[in-house]
Image (cartoon, coloured by chain):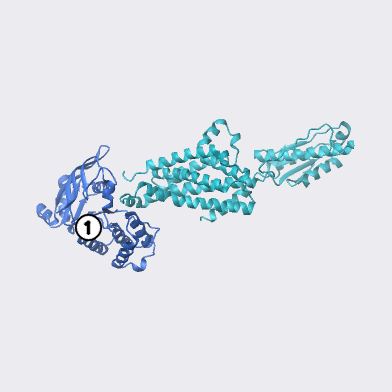
Chain colours: A cyan, B blue
Amino acid sequence: MIIMIPLLQMLVLVFAATYDLKNVNIYLVDKDMSSTSRELASKLDASPFFTINNTSFNPDDGEKAILDNKDHMVLVIPQGFERNLIRDDKASLQLLVNAIDGQAAQLGYSYAASVIRDFNKNIIAEWKGLPEFNPPYQINAVSRFWYNSELEYKWYMAPGVLCILVTLIGLFLSGMSLVKEKEQGTIEQLNVTPIRKIQFLAGKLIPFVVIALFDLSFGLLIAKLVFHLPVVGSLWLVFGFGMLYLLGILGLGLFVSTLADTQQQVMFVTYFFMMIFILMGGVFTPVDSMPHWAQIVDEGNPIYHFIRVMRMVVLKGSNFGDLIHEFIAMSIIGITFLSLAVLRYRKTA
Amino acid sequence: MEKVIEVHNLVKKFGSFVANDHLNFDVFQGEIFGFLGANGAGKTTAMKILCGLSSPTSGQVKVAGFDIYKETEKIKRNIGYMSQKFSLYEDMTIAENIRFFSGIYGISPKNRKEKQDKLLKDLDLESAKDSLIGSLPLGWKQKLAFSVAIFHDPKIVFLDEPTGGVDPITRRKFWDLIYEASDRGITIFVTTHYMDEAEYCNRVSIMNEGRIEALDTPDNLKKQFGAKNMDEVFLKIARNVE
């Protein structure tokens, strides 16, 4: 279990939860049938993102293909496209995008637009006989993506999925531990022994910290070997923060466990926390684009801090000085959860 | 004889419900004290207070010479407890359970080894040392739970309906273990539903609706109520109260 869960999660989720756009099917409605329109179509088809799936002369067929979810986009090249381009120096195209999946639609649209823009530039250069690399009067903005220059989404997702993994293990194991003893009646047996509160809670925390940290290292190893995740920063920082993080998460799990009487109750409550933590934590969607109140609430979300630290250290090489805010916030969260658990756990009812 | 449990005017209330209504009794060193009563009479509540699992509403209680309010942890060093819900760890082996509880009571590994060997031999469980508790039959589990409860040689052991759900022969064997422990000087405080078991006790108290209605040796109780056996004594007390 301890090996299989991280292995499966890393290998399946990281690939599945990708934002990379591949295999966008285009329905081509070429009413022009000119050499220019054909050239544009073959250029799109040649790009790794697009496949021209179907062609027809009727735009309604294209619409139907989108309705049937067969294709993602319809490109309509109107009659007289080439003629207009030569005579008036401009021509229009129609691009219909299926926006059910907003993110994919936007990405697909901008990829397609950039292919078309590129194509446009080439014709200008060809026809006007100007060198391709030196178009007239044009500002050329060159962007570079720092810390993940190839926009490798697996590098972005891997630390996030690892955070979820560690959280899942910590929260569920600690949540179940105490309530299982309540269900079996062993807690009563322990409560009549002279065992100290601190010994008992340490016994409930330490094994889970070890298991979760083991899975964290195992997950990082998979990320390194399979996705070639560059680990720029210090692993000590990752594990140091991981320890702090786990104390908080385990504290929360234990606290839930002290309140609950059955494992079902624990499942419901921890699942509720998991959902909020993950969806608000910035694993899949950037926290910066969340509403302001959500960003404030996120200061109390342990996953938010852990993911930030993981990504900052692993991809960017941030040092302790850059992460002081996260360390302080996490310490406050951790101490709060742990104290709740310690205060709530009583040997005498 | 030395008193190991002293209870004066013990009251336990849950809201307006009085579970224990001014209980008064003493238990002496080495005796087998039967704590009887119908379901809901307040036996388990009183026993949990004596074990330090629950605090009383009022009254003075001393267990093993320590005050129940201030010295709960000291009491816990001197008692053993076995509840009606079987409570060794099902997913650990016999040896692991013994090691775990020895650790809590601070029994040294060498000492543990000796006592463990003797325990397994007495219970005829040497070959089952490394089997999981969960895989054992209920009768074995109960004998084992009792042996683990007295593994650290407590002054008193509390047994809360220890023989629920097993056949008469297994029950009889369980009582052999209780007598052995009693011979070693361990005081036994036991609750039960079985009136034949009440006959095995040195003294018996019978509770009804939170009060102790009778307390004496089984023979004296039978004389007092003009009954043939403990069963009749019990029924007479229960009817009188109604």
- Label 1 crowding class (10 Å Cα cut-off): few <14, some 14-19, many 20+? many
**Residue A103 vs residue A166, the one in the foreground:** A166
In the picture provided, is B157 more to the left or to the right than A330? left
Q: Residue, x 79% and y 37% (percent of image)?
A: A117
**Percent position of residue B46, x then y:** 24, 47
Placement of the N terminus of chain B among the 4 image quadrants? bottom left
Give the SS element for disc 1.
Answer: loop
Where is residue A77? Give x, y as percent. Answer: 80, 38
Can you say whether B50 is above or below B133 in the image? above
Viewed as shown, does residue B189 lie left or right of A297?
A: left
Task: Identify the image quadrant of residue A42.
Answer: top right
Q: Position of residue A234 (x, y in %)?
A: 58, 47
Residue A11 visible in this rendered orientation of the protein: no
Label 1, on which residue?
B186
**Location of residue A125 in the rendering, given as x and y in whole percent from the top left corner:** 86, 37
Q: Quadrant of the C terminus of chain B?
A: top left
Which chain does tag 1 point to? B
Quarter of image, res A95:
top right
In the image, what residue type sits under mark 1? Ile
Residue B109's quadrant in the figure? bottom left
Number of residue marks: 1
State whether residue A228 appears in this view: yes
Considering depth in this image, is B176 or B60 the residue closer to the camera? B60
Q: Residue at x 55, y 45 (%)?
A: A237
| Looking at the image, residue B85 lies above or below residue B67 | below
